[in-house]
Image: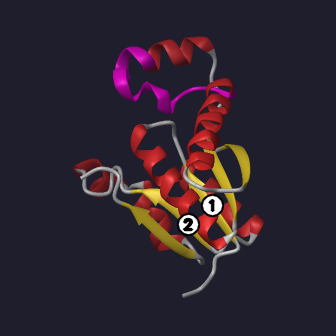
Amino acid sequence: MTAYRTVVVGTDGSDSSYVAVEKAASLAGAAGSTLIVACAYYPTDDRDVAAASDMLKDEAYQVRGSAPTNEILRTARDKATAAGAKEIVEKAIVGEPVESLLDLVRETQADLLVVGNRGLNTLAGRLLGSVPSDVARKSKSDVLIVHTVR
């Protein structure tokens, strides 16, 4: 089996994405790899956040500015450390998740991209695309889709 030197994992702050972080951290720790934990976000103002929170309810965490992103990355780092990763880099990226992750993989010459399966088997995911299916289709590196939602 190939030893991965650099592993990128995406998180959006959801519980399921943290499962993907823990799996990626376990793999990176076992291989002695660098783990890059990435969170893509769009800058927003307070009115946008309030409107999104009203409409999205439990899914509102996906539309916040950089301050919550930093907290998401800190939490992901803690989970990655507990799962065995030694060398961890946090990366907040402005932009949409799929292209941001793929750009980061290219930029860092990562060997493996890890994402959760959330949205993969939903109607919206089938009609509009989902992060796991889109990165798997477009990535030039290996992709691991972790079953975080069954």
Most common SS among magenta residues: helix
Residue 100 visible somewhere in the drawing = yes
Q: Is residue 77 left or right of residue 116?
A: right
* Mark 2 nearby-residue class (10 Å; few <14, some 14–19, many ≥20): some
User: Residue 55 location, x and y as percent?
Assistant: 36, 19
Numbered circle sitting on residue 8:
1
User: Residue 69 location, x and y as percent?
Assistant: 63, 32
Residue 99 visible somewhere in the drawing = no
Distance, label 1 to label 2, CA atoms, is 11 Å
At 67% from the left and 59% from the top, the residue drawn is 35
User: Residue 24 location, x and y as percent?
Assistant: 54, 60
Q: Quadrant of the N terminus?
A: bottom right
In the image, what residue type sits under mark 2? Leu
Numbered circle sitting on residue 27:
2
Which span of residues is magenta-colored?
53-66
In the image, what residue type sits under mark 1? Val
At 45% from the left and 55% from the top, the residue drawn is 131
Circle nearer the N terminus (1, 2):
1
Above or below residue 99? Residue 91 is above
Numbered circle sitting on residue 99:
none
At 64% from the left and 43% from the top, the residue drawn is 77
User: Residue 129 location, x and y as percent?
Assistant: 38, 57
Above or below residue 22? Residue 76 is above
Name the front one of labels 1 and 2.
Answer: 2
SS at badge 1? strand
Q: Colour mode?
A: secondary structure
Foreground pick, 96 / 150: 150
At 47% from the left and 68% from the top, the residue drawn is 144
Circles 1 and 2 in contact, beta carbons < 8 Å: no
Above or below residue 140? Residue 132 is above
Q: Which of the 4 quarters of the picture holds residue 87?
A: bottom right
